[in-house]
Each structure stands twice: as C-alpha cells, then as structure tokens.
Image (spheres, grey):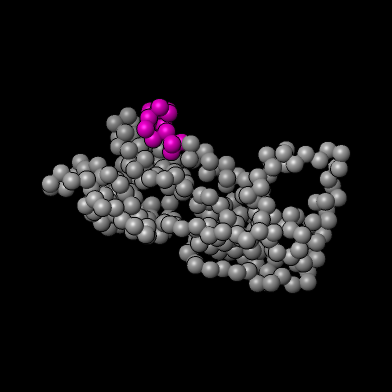
Amino acid sequence: MSDGAALSYVYDGSFDGLLCCAWESCRTGERPEFIISENEDQLPLFDTKFIETDEAKALSMRARIKEAVSSQALAFIKKAFLTCLENKEMYILDFICEGFRKHYRVMNDLDGPWYPLFRAVRELESETEAYRGFVRFSEVGNALVSVIEPKNYVLPMLMAHFCPRFPDDAVIIYDKTHKMILLGAEGKGKIAYIDEFEPASPDDYERETRRLWRSFYNSIGIKERYNPKCRMGNMPKRFWAQMTEFWENEAPPVKLTDAENAPKVINA
C-alpha cells in the first residue's frame, strides 16, 4: 500500500487464516478495505495482499486475545466466524483491534460498529438450537444420516451436540448449503468438504419407521386446536423439507437448494 491505494487481504478462508490477517494488520498498522477468502469467485479491484496461514502466528493471536481481552471474546469471534454475516471478517478484525484497546469491556459495547456481529452470533445460536431439535436422522446401513440446509455454518456446533450422544453409532450430517459433511464415530467427529452427497435409498425397515413416525405425528394433533401460524412460529417452514413428518411420500416435498462461497476450512 505504498501509493496509498486501498488494500484487500486475501486468505485461505480458515479461522486460523483470519487470525493471521489480524496478526498482519496489527504488525503493519494497516487496515485493509476488505478481507476476502480465496474461494470467492470475484476478487476486488483494489491492491491485494495474500496472507499465508501460519499456525504459530494464529496461536500467538489466540493467546493475545485471551490475555488482552478475554477467553469469552475469543469464543465469541469463533462463533462470529461461523455466521453468514456479509463482510464478517472486517467486523471481526475491528472487534479484535478495539478489544486490544478496551480489553474485556469490548464485550459490553453494543453500540460499536461491530454490533452486527452480536446480532449474527445470536442468529447462529438460534439456528443451531433449532437444528438440535429439527434434525431428522435416517438409518442407512450402520449409520444415522441426515441432510440439512442451514443459513449459517452450524456443523461445528452440531458436532459437539450429536457426536457425544451417539457414541455407539456412526453419524453423518450433510450441510447441502455449504457442501460440508460431518462424520461422527465413537463420540467424536470431523468435518470435511464434499461437492455432492446423496444418501442411499432407505430399506423396508427405514420406510416403515418413517411411516410410523408420520402416523404418530398426525395422530397426536388436536384438530380443534390446529393453528398453522403458531406452528410456523415454533417450527419455521424452511426446516420442513428435512423433517420426515412433513413428507407425504418417501422424499422431501421440495428440492433442496445449493449455496456458494463456503470457507475452505472450519477449524475454530
């Protein structure tokens, strides 16, 4: 940025990579105009600087945030990174820089320019909580399999919820939106990227289980108290395509859609 032109950082899309962007910004005193994942289709017209991911720098930045701000702040930016907030990297960078000035008080500063981060994290937590109840598994072979279509990158948070609860089962959850797959076994899990995933066709036992579940769901309803607005308020309609109780046949009622621009690695 020797000529004073606007500068953009380009990183590998990982959380450690973003921490390295923060490390570089603190070292040089630069404030980039944008921080952009190399996976994005279009790079900006500004001058760009590729920030290489360095584990030692990332660990140093983690330790500095915990010491100078708080462990709560580090946990917060980990969640913020999993949100679908546009330009979230710049909000996180500004939050980190302000945290080094205000220390732990930054967590109470809801009037700052990073307020959208707080709102985005709340939405992430709300969506994660919804999926903890709305994920519907099918037994395919020796695995419990589910396909979801979230707005945010919820798989890391769902991994901590579901894998310990099924220590004796293989767990597979495919995030069709971001083309990510959670593979769980023996109470632990890992997340990888996969372009396509199509669960195997259900066997007779699984089809019968689905039929019984739909029958149970329909039988416990009270016709006189039917309130579709209330149901949609507690069970938003965007989740219905993955919930077998709403399937009339053996397939989702609507085609799940794809999304773009997933980060390269989720390692928060």
Q: Which residues are magenta?
A: 104-118
Between 43 and 166, the one lying in front of the other is: 43
Residue visible at 30% across and 47% down in the picture: 34
Provide residue 38's location: percent of width, then percent of height: 33, 59
Please indicate whether residue 225 sits to the left or right of residue 72 in the image: right
When asked about the image quadrant of residue 256, the answer is: bottom right
Asked if residue 166 shows in the view, the reply is yes
Residue visible at 74% across and 54% down in the picture: 246
Asked if residue 168 shows in the view, the reply is no
Residue 106 colored in magenta in the image: yes
Residue 224 colored in magenta in the image: no
Residue visible at 47% across and 47% down in the picture: 84
| Relative height, residue 255 to residue 15 (above, below) | below
Provide residue 208's location: percent of width, then percent of height: 80, 66
Please indicate whether residue 227 sits to the left or right of residue 78 in the image: right
When asked about the image quadrant of residue 224, the answer is: top right
Please indicate whether residue 220 sits to the left or right of residue 72 in the image: right
Provide residue 128's location: percent of width, then percent of height: 57, 47
| Relative height, residue 200 to residue 84 (above, below) | below
| Relative height, residue 200 to residue 265 (above, below) | below
- Tag count: 0
Between 259 and 165, the one lying in front of the other is: 259
